[in-house]
Image (cartoon, rainbow, N blue to C red):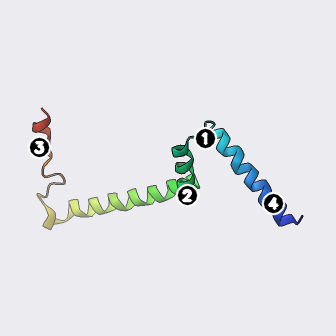
Amino acid sequence: MTLETTFMQSVQLAVVCLRRQFAPTGCGSVLKAMQFIANPRESCAKVYAIMHRLLERITELKDDPKCAGTVCYPCRSQTVSFVR
């Protein structure tokens, strides 16, 4: 058995242990979510970057004189009145 094989087996064992710890019932949706997210730190960094770019864009549009008076949710007042 090579060192690489031993390392890969230990990594696989660690993944199985983490799955048991975070999804003890083996719920398929939780396991799929964990597989999709993969690395939570990287996923959070990506979401943070997307939100940061979105806020920058909103700030640009807010300060742009061509966009003055533009409403983000033009049907919002109608929707609220329908709910009431």
Q: Which residue is mark 4?
A: 7
Specify the quadrant of the image occupied by residue 7. bottom right
Would residue 39 be found to the left or right of residue 81 on screen?
A: right
Specify the quadrant of the image occupied by residue 78. top left
| Residue 26 numbered tag | 1
User: Type of residue at label 1?
Assistant: Gly
Give the class, few, some or many, for how many residues have Cα within 10 Å of label 3's Cα (few <14, many ≥20).
few
> Tag 1's secondary structure?
loop
Q: Which residue is mark 3?
A: 77
> Tag 2's secondary structure?
helix
Spot occupied by residue 32 in the image (x, y as percentages of width and height) = 54, 50
Q: Earlier in the sequence, mark 4 or mark 3?
A: 4
> Tag 3's secondary structure?
helix
Give the class, few, some or many, for how many residues have Cα within 10 Å of label 4's Cα (few <14, many ≥20).
few
Q: Earlier in the sequence, mark 2 or mark 4?
A: 4
Would residue 20 be found to the left or right of residue 81 on screen?
A: right
Would residue 28 be found to the left or right of residue 52 on screen?
A: right
Q: Are the residues flagged by discs 1 and 2 in contact, CB closer than 8 Å? A: no
User: Residue at horizontal 71%, vertical 44%?
Assistant: 17
Q: Nearer the viewer, mark 2 or mark 4?
A: 4
User: Type of residue at label 3?
Assistant: Ser
Distance between the alpha carbons at the discs numbered 1 and 2? 24 Å
User: Residue at horizontal 75%, vertical 55%?
Assistant: 11
Q: Which residue is mark 2?
A: 42
